[in-house]
Image: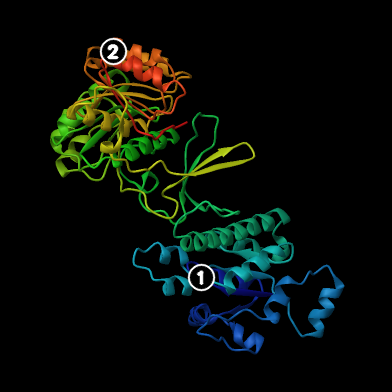
Amino acid sequence: MKALISTYDRTGVVELAHALRKADFELVSTGGTGSVLSEAGLPVTQVADLTGFPEILDGRVKTLHPIVYGGILARRGLPGHLEQLAEHEIDTIDLVACNLYPLIDTVSSPDVTLEDALEKIDIGGPTMIRAAAKNFPDVIVLVDPSDYGWVGERLTQENGGASELTMEERRSLARKAFQHVALYDTAASQYLDESSTLDSAEKTFGFTKLYDMSYGENPHQEAALYADVLSTGGIVRAEQLHGQELSFNNVLDADAAWTTVCDFEEQAVTVVKHANPCGLAVHDDQPTAYQRAFEGDSMSAYGGIVGFNRTVTAATARAMKGVLYHVMVAPDYEPEALEILRKRKQLRILRATPAAGPLANVGIRRVSGGALIQTGDTIVEDPSTWKIATKRGPTEAELNNLAFAWKASRHIRSNTIVLAKDGAMVGMGTGQPNRVTSIHLAIRIAGEKAKGSALASDAYMPFTDNIEMASEGGIIAIAQPGGSIRDDEVIEAADRLGMAMVFTGVRHFKH
């Protein structure tokens, strides 16, 4: 029996080779791996000696030869295949251990050149892995060093040999091999797709598992956290500085907090509950920004997630005293702030950076039988270009509050109504089947703070009852996309009630 070993990552490869020799395998290898095995005292045949053809093109062509692929692909149960092997003096290859050039690590570097990337696209390795996986009933294929140990043990058992692996085990190794190559090819495709467009008729997404979770949204659901193959930053790559492991729902909520505050250039703080910001504020003084975000809905804040887009100060950490939070995410923390926060046993502390990578601006939603894919809602808007729809235009202060509320609205589930005053969200209505109910909820949460506030609606207001309820709550300015067949009626109602209203021309649904 022959085993062909060709690896870039040589973790455990010497131990595997020793086990294979004990199981009476002859070892065949390529240049670098072969040298490592020889230095370990193992007898090994170079692929070039097996094929009678040297490596060429600076190593680009090593294993691409009929002697290699005939030995891998021949079906042992077909006499015709074995006769052809004998005719061409080709021996079977019964095990292939291979892993690939570090393409993913290479293209993840911000300084990578196209030439560097192309040189790290493995050709022979994936081809050899695919061939072995295709013929898995007769060939063992290993791409993961974590499999070397148990496979080696099985092959060196008293009555061992390659036949001792069950067909299900061989199938599982082949599945892993095909997935390994698929992820590799996906990384190459994503790297070359500089624009991350959605105009391709075929689209693959590659994810690598970071860790298993205790459960999903509910205890009876299995869950794991995966990362985009070429991603950097974001909640998935956040560094956990303190606390118990993150739950499925913790990750969802933390992501909502982090993406919300990252949308603001000003210092921003948000409090999130059930993936929706229930409090949000901007202010130059961080403790003040936090306090205003907390007061946006202090009842809902309990047991929530808090996010910052600036380094958390010790003064802010002290201001949070007495409020239970499950997760906190920020770009960094002052040492004294960490010392204070780490005393909270139930708090998980994350240090994050903004997400980057080919899919950073692409959203994927699974639906039965497939997926919906879209680019992110990251349009840059200039409030000075908004159309003033009413006789009274917004004052400078009102326009600032409208701009803040409008930006907040795209981070909250529709139908969304956001009330804002002085750079803080004072009320929010979300997830309702009609906009009137969302307005009612936002006003109820805001209470007296609704008076003099500005309102943002993520989609157009189709009826005058929206305007009338807002006015009754004390709201004085409205931002909405416009575009309803009843815009004239809605504008007339706003004029009658002395309100200022602008049409943004953009919708921010978030289902």
Mark 1 closeness class: few <14, some 14–19, many ≥20 residues within 10 Å: many
Q: Is residue 329 at least partly visible in the picture?
A: no
Mark closest to the chain's N terminus, 2 or 1: 1
Residue 93, relative to residue 176: is it above or below? below
x%, y% of residue 174?
65, 59
Q: Nearer the viewer, residue 156 or 261?
A: 261
Q: Quadrant of residue 5?
A: bottom right
What amino acid is found at the position of numbered circle 1 in the picture?
Ile
Position of residue 351 in the picture relative to residue 188 (left or right): left
Q: Which residue position holds label 1?
A: 121
For image coordinates 59% across by 57% down, the residue present is 179
Q: Nearer the viewer, residue 370 or 463?
A: 463
Q: Nearer the viewer, residue 229 or 340?
A: 229
Task: Quote the CA–CA distance across marks 2 and 1.
Answer: 66 Å
Position of residue 181 in the picture relative to residue 280 (left or right): right
x%, y% of residue 462?
44, 20
